[in-house]
Image (cartoon, grey):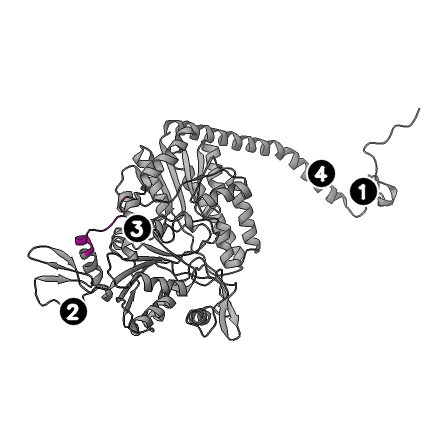
Amino acid sequence: WARPPRWPPLAPPSTLARPHADGPFFPRGRSARACAQGVRQRERCHMAAPYVALLGLCVFLALLLLVAWKRWRRGRAARHVVVVVLGDVGRSPRMQYHALSLAKRGFSVSLLGFCSECLEDSKPHDALLQNDRIRIVSLTELQTRAVGPRILQYGVKVVFQAVHLLWKLMWREPAAYIFLQNPPGLPAMAVCWFVGCLCGSKLVIDWHNYGYSIMGLVHGPHHLLVLLAKWYEKLCGRLSHLNLCVTNAMREDLAENWGIRAVTVHDRPASFFKETPLHLQHQLFMKLGRTYPAFRARTEPSDPGVERSAFTERTAQSGLVTRLGGRPALLVSSTSWTGVRIRPYRGSYWPCSPHPCGPVPRANSAEGGVHREKGRALGREGGLEIALTLRSLPVEDEDFSILLAALEKFEQLVLEGARLPSLVCAITGKGPLKEFYSRLISQKHFRHIQVCTPWLEAKDYPLLLGAADLGVCLHKSSSGLDLPMKVVDMFGCCLPVCAVRFRCLHELVRHEENGLVFADTEELAAQLQMLFSNFPDPSGKLSQFRRNLRESEQLGWDESWKRTVLPLLVDT
């Protein structure tokens, strides 16, 4: 018979220490006390394991109950929709229009977004605020300080927004659909998808652009953050039940490169974007004239019973409003006054990327001088390298210096004797470079051009577009696949437009039919000269474009939404 092995087996002899008197062998380097502590720790782990398993089971059961309760409530609230804008509600017109159309079809709508400025300068339209079926839920925007690495700042902001948005969505009434604007989609895409899984809601993503392409304007297309954002958008975009997009070009790109099937819902003007009657034009001009001298009358009327603005006059006795003879032309543009990273180059500050429409302008040219002066001004404020979320240098999607240089050329033509009217340029919008450009404009000392930069109330913006003679759009899409909403609004007011050329602009602006397309300052200046020759001329190009817009009978937003989006909601 073989001798039975000793249990538990001993360690190899080389690892055993000398035995204690009348005691067992212990592993080399460990005392009896250490071994006893190890035994007690293992016993505690074995005792704690059932409690940990029980806790996990309780959490799992609580999550199941929460999901069941949420889905039961959603069944009772099938006509509820949540619209999510991880941005300023007042500056998201398309999502406001979605909410209004949903409310008109009998849905109750919760509109989640940043509303910190809603009572000041980015107030949503009155139709949204006065609708009983729409409730605006304010999200808190994290105000981060420029402390630490930029990637750490992004990380903190994303985590905060994810937790905050999750909290807001989970404690709201469950919705049949969650409409999400993208961009910004980080981290809203993942959060809305997760809430949809818990509550049984269907996620609808409305693609306005690609978020990673906007980040690429600041960091460059090959930056790690940009690549991660692209991967995230591509992954989460496939998780939605329904995808909408703004152009046919974007629909084709989503299908070919991302494997996402989308439905094109072109931007359409809301019903309140229309030509402004003459008496409302006069009221608007008089209101703006109290703040902005460009809208005030050049000469006071001799009759005290006549009320006069720069463009119109009204007789108090009859109430009749007429246009002034020899009035200036009113040009309107809108910009976000923003820009991108700048770094020093031979003593000056130059954009980090080449101009998308050609080489960077020479320093001694009018346009190049604007960029040089702007770079120096920003450089003094931010040091040798500035990283701002901006859009008004040659690498971004709006370059205001193109219009400014064209106005200088227009001024020179008038001084040389060309038959051109004086111009009043109203540049609307708000952004970090507004004060800088205002100072730059004031240094030009124009004699025949007046430039003002008003920030209008939501109700006044459509009135101004409906009263203008020409609109100028400087939007260059970061992806080349979205269209400027400002041009849609201008067309709704039958306002002809000069727009800068980019990839899919032809889906909106038809050259020589409802407006003109330009590539640089030279082309814009030539177009301004042609359009305003012999102004106001009933047989001129401006009048022809306006007639074409009136006769086009384009669908409004609500009718277009009824034909394209509503059937998709019914089918799903």
- N-terminal of the pair, mark 3 or mark 4, is 4
State the residue position of label 4: 39
Residue 259, relative to residue 518: is it above or below? above
Q: Position of residue 112 (x, y in %)?
A: 38, 43
Disc 1 to disc 2, how far (Cα)? 107 Å
Q: Which mark is residue 26?
A: 1
- N-terminal of the pair, mark 3 or mark 1, is 1
State the residue position of label 2: 299
Residue type at the position of mark 3: Lys
**Mark 3 or mark 2, whichever is nearer to me:** 2
The secondary structure type at the circle numbered 1 is: loop
- N-terminal of the pair, mark 1 or mark 4, is 1
**Which residue is nearer to you in this view: 430 or 129?**
430
Q: Position of residue 169 (x, y in %)?
A: 42, 39
The secondary structure type at the circle numbered 2 is: loop
Q: Residues within 10 Å of mark 3 (few under 14, many from 20)?
A: some
- N-terminal of the pair, mark 3 or mark 2, is 3
